[in-house]
Image (tube, helix red, strand yellow):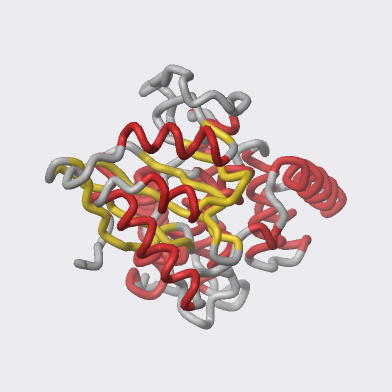
Amino acid sequence: MYVVTIDLDTHRRELLAHCYRMTGSVVDAEDLVQETMLRAWRSRETFDPGRASLRTWLYRIATNVCLTALERRGRRPLPSGLGAATFDPDTALVRSPEVPWLQPIPDALVTDPASVVASRGSVRLALVAAMQHLSARQRAVLILRDVLAWPAAEVADLLDVSVAAVNSLLQRARTQLASVSPAEDNTSEPSSAAQRATLDQFAAAFENADPALLTRLLAADVTLEMPPHLTWFAGRPAVTTFLSRVIRSGSWRLHPTRANSAPAFGTFLDGRPHGITLLDLQGSAITRITAFHDPALFERFVFDPH
């Protein structure tokens, strides 16, 4: 008999990232990691280090926990996954709090150690949102094969299907993902001085109510999504006109942070937490704004004062 001691500090972050990729919810992911650790502890006597590493064993448990959870829960979309964009800034916002929306996840919670195969890009918001279009099993196969680089035979053993079935699921998942996800080069890390200046100016445009500055920062095809609002806007004229009506000098404060491997801000309105806003950049232009209007998200984020 082999008794395993589970090192939570070593494995928790990468398992959280895995459960988040599967579910699109940081709240659900945290609960599922707890369930994974509980199941691992209860079945520790069955762990055989001669058959698999502790990390692989935990991933097997976590994947099964997620698959069970997804049988009871619907997908978590962004507004762009539910309907077409509007180009009319006068369109009334339709709020839908009953939808289980996709949630952002702080980089600080899921930044993997260098030894972990999974890349940071695999938790990008657009990719996680695109995964919501896949079935639970397609998600599992795609993540295990393309993110974690598991052999097809191991995935087949986990899911209790044939290798041919795994390959078929993977092919369908890749095809469907390609039809709904953005091209990989649509976003870039804000590493250059020009990109960092864009982020500073975006915050200044909000805090100083400067729509002219905001307009200069946005790409022509920029989009704006604001869960839990179903309504979302596309195109610089619609986005800037809409935002110019909500920014008021002295009312907003934006504190930098990071989420889903992207620059983000914690937004405060009249001194109170308002939400988490993520930005995608191409060069020094902002191509996508995703503003989650949910103050409850704040408890998981750390903000840089400025």
Image coordinates of residue 96 in percent, x first then y, are 40, 21
Image-based side of 82 in relation to 166, left or right: left
Image coordinates of residue 241 in percent, x first then y, are 45, 34
Residue at image coords 57%, 25%:
86
Which one is nearer the viewer's eye here, 110 or 230? 230
Which one is nearer the viewer's eye here, 257 or 159? 257
Image coordinates of residue 272 in percent, x first then y, are 14, 42
The quarter of the rendered structure image containing the C terminus is bottom left
Residue 53 visible to an observer of this rendering: yes
Which one is nearer the viewer's eye here, 206 or 159? 206
Image coordinates of residue 172 in percent, x first then y, are 81, 43
Q: In the displayed image of the protein, which residue is found farthest to the bottom?
A: 114
Residue 77 visible to an observer of this rendering: no
Image-based side of 14 in relation to 134, left or right: left
Task: Give the vertical position of 195 relative to 158 (above or below).
Answer: below
**Res 144 → quadrant:** bottom right
Residue at image coords 51%, 30%:
232
Q: In the displayed image of the protein, which residue is found farthest to the left?
A: 271
Residue at image coords 42%, 64%:
110
Image-based side of 155 in relation to 281, left or right: right
Residue at image coords 40%, 72%:
3
Task: Give the vertical position of 109 relative to 91 (above or below).
Answer: below
Which one is nearer the viewer's eye here, 69 or 22? 22
